[in-house]
Amino acid sequence: MPSPRDIDTVLKGWDFKPGEVSARLFKARSGREVLQMRVDMGVLQMETDLRPDGSRPHGADTYYDYLVGEVVREGGGFRLSKEQCAEADREFVQYYHRRLCWLSLREYRRAARDADHSLAFMDFVREHSADEEWTLSHEQNRPFILFHREQAAALAALEDAGPEGAIHELNVGLERFRDLFARYGAEEQYGEDTLVRRLEEMREAVRRRYEVGRTLDEQLAEAIRAEDYEQAARLRDRIRAGRPIGADGGSGAATG
């Protein structure tokens, strides 16, 4: 009989596959749902809400929440200590692993939520870190996290609101990427970026699959750029009315 302290029964029939994220939702003995991720030497188990390791740092929901409280207590001059940077790194890694699991399981809303946490935490450390090199080590991951966020948000919108909702999310995401490149003075690199191209390809794939042309949001943006304010007003009225109309007066989506 297996010892209650080994994990042989957990791993039985669940082989590790290099280069592949393998995750599952599982009922713990307490009855709560937990998330498990197969790794080379065993399994990671994570909570599905708040901090993945289930801890409450200094009584806060997450370490990010705790640090925000520290800023409130100490004022705008607050700077992260080396120990706090190390603890922040732990939380970033935990949310990264869980985000990968949610994407693997097609839990897109949850993946986007975890990406939002990481992006907000990155904004915080950029503002309050005294170590520029450490800050940049996180900033270089921002495009990858933002890509996960926009990909997940678009797929969730596709499920909940249909193809026009997905295209809208992808356009919003592309604007966020444009703003990110502008922040670092690299606007000329935007059109050649691999992640930007993947989001554009995803948007066009949705158009082809569901036979959607220019959405009302896109037509509105074009009217504003052309300073055709009468057309813009008409489009706003249609958007507010919630009419599911796609490009050029066609249906928003094809069935099948």
Image: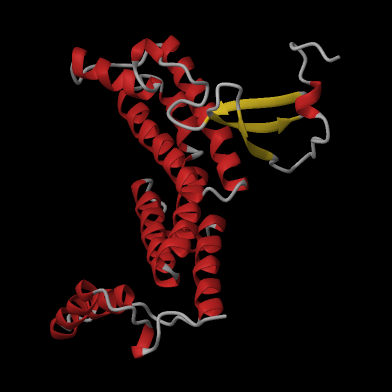
85 with respect to 5 (left or right): left
The residue sitting at the bottom extreme is 249
Please name the residue shown 43% across and 65% down the image.
166
On screen, residue 194 above or below 231 = above
Instruction: Give the position of the N terminus as an image quadrant.
Output: top right
On screen, residue 231 above or below 37 = below
Q: Quadrant of residue 98?
A: top right
204 with respect to 43 (left or right): left
Residue situated in front as seen by the camera: 229 or 103 = 103
Please name the residue shown 54% across and 66% down the image.
202
176 with respect to 226 (left or right): right
207 with respect to 44 (left or right): left
The x and y percentages for residue 52 are 51, 26
Residue situated in front as seen by the camera: 41 or 82 = 41
Q: Quadrant of residue 177?
A: bottom left
Colour approach in the figure: secondary structure
Q: In this figure, what is the number of numbered marks?
A: 0
Residue situated in front as seen by the camera: 106 or 230 = 106
The residue sitting at the right extreme is 1
The x and y percentages for residue 205 are 55, 72
Please name the residue shown 39% across and 22% down the image.
62
The x and y percentages for residue 193 are 53, 57
The x and y percentages for residue 53 are 52, 21
Instruction: Give the position of the C terminus as an image quadrant.
Output: bottom right
Please name the residue shown 45% across and 71% down the image.
163
On screen, residue 224 above or below 197 = below
